[in-house]
């Protein structure tokens, strides 16, 4: 799930949700909306998050990194 992957990235980078939101200039209610309303961010926001953590969009959305047309789960590495 998207939020679980973002939470793992936040934890592994030793930052807080608030720092992520501040650094990306996102609304402070973003996580509330994603969690409670079951929404995912817009494509623009997803791209910002992916760039921030240096991961591809496919990882944020599906937990997979796609290399030259091949899928690979991060757990397989």
Image (spheres, helix red, strand yellow):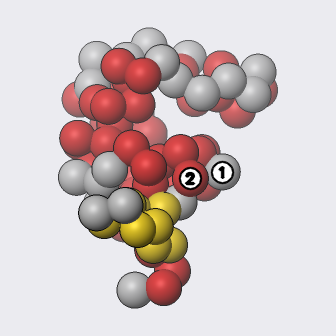
Q: List x then y, in percent, for residue 56.
A: 32, 50
Nearest the eye: 12 or 69? 69
Q: Is residue 76 above or below residue 61?
A: below
- Tag 2 residue: 62
Give the quarter of the image for residue 36: top right
Is residue 8 visible in the rendered image? The answer is no
Q: List x then y, in percent, for residue 41.
A: 52, 23
- Give the position of the C terminus as an image quadrant: bottom left
Q: Mark 1 and 2 residues: CB-CB less than 8 Å, in contact? A: no
Q: Is residue 21 above or below residue 68?
A: above
Local SS, label 1: loop
Instruction: Identify the residue shown where x is 28% and y is 63%.
Output: 68
Q: Residue furthest bottom?
A: 77
Q: Which disc number belongs to residue 1?
A: 1
Local SS, label 2: helix
Q: Is residue 30 left or right of residue 13?
A: right
Q: List x then y, in percent, for residue 58.
A: 44, 49
């Amino acid at each position: 799930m998207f939020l679980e992957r973002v939470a793992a990235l936040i934890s592994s980078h030793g930052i807080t949700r608030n720092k992520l939101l501040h650094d990306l200039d996102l609304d402070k209610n973003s996580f509330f909306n994603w969690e409670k309303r079951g929404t995912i961010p817009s494509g623009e926001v997803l791209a910002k998050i992916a760039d921030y953590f240096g991961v591809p969009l496919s990882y944020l959305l599906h937990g997979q990194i796609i290399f030259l047309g091949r899928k690979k789960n991060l757990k397989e590495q």
